Image (cartoon, rainbow, N blue to C red):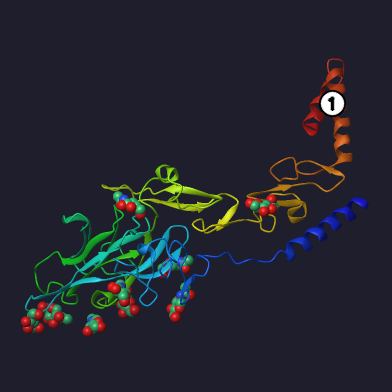
């Protein structure tokens, strides 16, 4: 009875303590800097004004949602190294005399890269071909080809009939996107005079038969990866002035392989912290006791938050580490009862040769 009262008192006390702690909104920008363009959050190292971003490359123009030396429109930026942007559709169309009307796109992404795992190169049309040419070193290497036919169109299906998607082998920063018709025969597909090529985030495009001649002015979301610096983490840490990751964070090397230089690194909050690892005091302690992240037997009541972690405890009158994954909490009485049973077991083992073999076999699995 006394024991239960104790638990309830602790519960009430902790409940009061945790509700009085104000829910502080974690800052995403430098002090005094706007952290939004309209309704889009712009997390540091990105910024909307001079001195608000890490460098010019990360300065977002709020008017057209762009960054310098890039020609995509920003949709959103996440603090974990991803950015979503809109890219246009390239096309090539024929008229009845066979003349070509086409639009190719030179895509520039500054120092940001099209993710090779999160996007697909897509071709829409009949005998259509979508291709990408890397423009970084001036050479025209076709890195990707996606081809279609039109022998059995199916709405919602993008597996070669009217629509085809292929993954990207590289993370690109500067390339030409273009659409081509594979056959030169005019009119072989009278219902389809145009072919289209575009990049799109996985699962963000569903083919529809009517798309075959209606995609001219559309644009699609793509996922881009962003990093900071131009060295590995190991190199960056040597120079305290330019190393960007702040306290309670970890540095993550970019996985991208590039011919020249280094693609840089990203910062993320260490385990037990969350927020913006690029800002001073940006990584804030996670209160594991409030959410489901703790494995304390008595939940919030037996949980004590610490910097980067938490501890569990048992109510008075009970023993153990207080963790689901550990020894939990057991009543002291139960513990002594168990010791008593251990002694009993010992006696049984001792007596075993004499007469209690069947009893031993029966009892022991229960005791252990
Ligand atoms: C921001 O507002 C625009 C319209 O003003 C809306 O289309 C868009 O979905 C909004 N974005 C977010 C992330 O809320
Ligand atoms: C956005 O606007 C700036 C300045 O007004 C301009 O230099 C830049 O080219 C524009 N970017 C895009 C993608 O339209
Ligand atoms: C960012 O935009 C992309 C593309 O529209 C969307 O898939 C993603 O959920 C958005 N992320 C956030 C955090 O708004
Ligand atoms: C497509 O090509 C066919 C055959 O050459 C022609 O009759 C038709 O007018 C063309 N359609 C368009 C939209 O150009
Ligand atoms: C086809 O396009 C060419 C060039 O754009 C144009 O000169 C020609 O008149 C067009 N033919 C038809 C039938 O529209
Ligand atoms: C695709 O959908 C359109 C209407 O949305 C329909 O007219 C057409 O017949 C459908 N095509 C197929 C192959 O199901
Ligand atoms: C695409 O947009 C341009 C300019 O906004 C317009 O002139 C053209 O007719 C549009 N094309 C289609 C196929 O909608
Ligand atoms: C790396 O970044 C530093 C500082 O931003 C700059 O001075 C240097 O030229 C860069 N090096 C390369 C290879 O881009
Ligand atoms: C966490 O660390 C900060 C300083 O780094 C200190 O002020 C604070 O009291 C610590 N909190 C806990 C729960 O230990």
Crowdedness near tag 1: few (<14), some (14–19) or many (≥20) residues, C-alpha within 10 Å? some
68 is higher (above) or lower (below) than 304? below
* Residue 334 percent coordinates (x, y): 87, 39
Q: Quadrant of residue 197?
A: bottom left
* Identity of the residue drawn at 19% across and 54% down: 137
* Identity of the residue drawn at 28% across and 58% down: 173
Residue most toward the right? 1
* Residue wearing tag 1: 345
- Quick one: 343 or 91, which is closer to the camera? 91
Does mark 1 have its CB less than 8 Å from ligand 9? no
Numbered circles on residues, count? 1
198 is higher (above) or lower (below) than 359? below
Look at the image and tell me in which quarter the C terminus lies: top right
* Residue 227 percent coordinates (x, y): 39, 55
* Residue 321 percent coordinates (x, y): 75, 42
- Quick one: 98 or 33, which is closer to the camera? 33
Q: Quadrant of residue 365?
A: top right
* Identity of the residue drawn at 33% across and 48% down: 262
Disc 1 is placed on an element classified as helix
Residue 1 is at least partly visible in this image: no
Residue 63 is at least partly visible in this image: yes
- Quick one: 123 or 39, which is closer to the camera? 39
């Amino acid at each position: 009875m006394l024991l239960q009262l104790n638990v309830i008192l602790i519960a009430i006390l902790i409940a009061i303590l945790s509700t009085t702690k104000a829910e502080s909104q974690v800052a995403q920008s430098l002090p005094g800097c706007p952290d939004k363009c309209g309704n889009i959050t712009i997390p540091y190292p990105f910024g909307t004004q001079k001195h608000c971003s890490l460098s010019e490359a990360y300065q977002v123009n709020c008017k057209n949602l762009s960054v310098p030396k890039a020609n995509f429109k920003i949709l959103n930026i996440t603090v974990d190294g991803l950015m979503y942007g809109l890219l246009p559709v390239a096309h090539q169309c024929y008229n009845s005399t066979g003349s070509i009307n086409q639009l190719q796109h030179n895509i520039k992404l500054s120092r940001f890269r099209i993710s090779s795992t999160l996007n697909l190169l897509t071709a829409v049309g009949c005998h259509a071909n979508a291709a990408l040419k890397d423009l970084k070193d001036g050479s025209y290497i076709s890195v990707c080809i996606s081809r279609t036919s039109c022998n059995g169109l199916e709405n919602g299906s993008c597996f070669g009939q009217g629509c085809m998607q292929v993954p990207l082998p590289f993370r690109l920063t500067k390339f030409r996107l273009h659409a081509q018709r594979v056959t030169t025969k005019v009119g072989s597909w009278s219902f389809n005079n145009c072919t289209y090529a575009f990049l799109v985030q996985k699962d963000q495009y569903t083919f529809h038969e009517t798309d075959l001649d209606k995609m001219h002015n559309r644009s699609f979301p793509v996922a881009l990866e962003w990093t900071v610096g131009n060295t590995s983490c190991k190199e960056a840490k040597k120079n305290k002035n330019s190393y960007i990751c702040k306290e309670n964070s970890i540095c993550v090397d970019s996985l991208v392989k590039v011919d020249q230089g280094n693609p840089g690194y990203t910062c993320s909050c260490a385990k037990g912290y969350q927020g913006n690892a690029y800002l001073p005091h940006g990584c804030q302690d996670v209160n594991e006791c409030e959410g489901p992240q703790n494995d304390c037997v008595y939940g919030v009541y037996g949980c004590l938050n610490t910097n980067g972690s938490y501890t569990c405890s048992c109510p008075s009158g009970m023993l153990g580490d207080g963790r689901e994954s550990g020894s939990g909490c057991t009543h002291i009485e139960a513990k002594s009862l168990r010791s008593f049973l251990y002694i009993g077991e010992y006696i049984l083992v001792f007596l075993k040769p004499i007469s209690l073999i069947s009893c031993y076999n029966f009892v022991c699995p229960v005791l252990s």
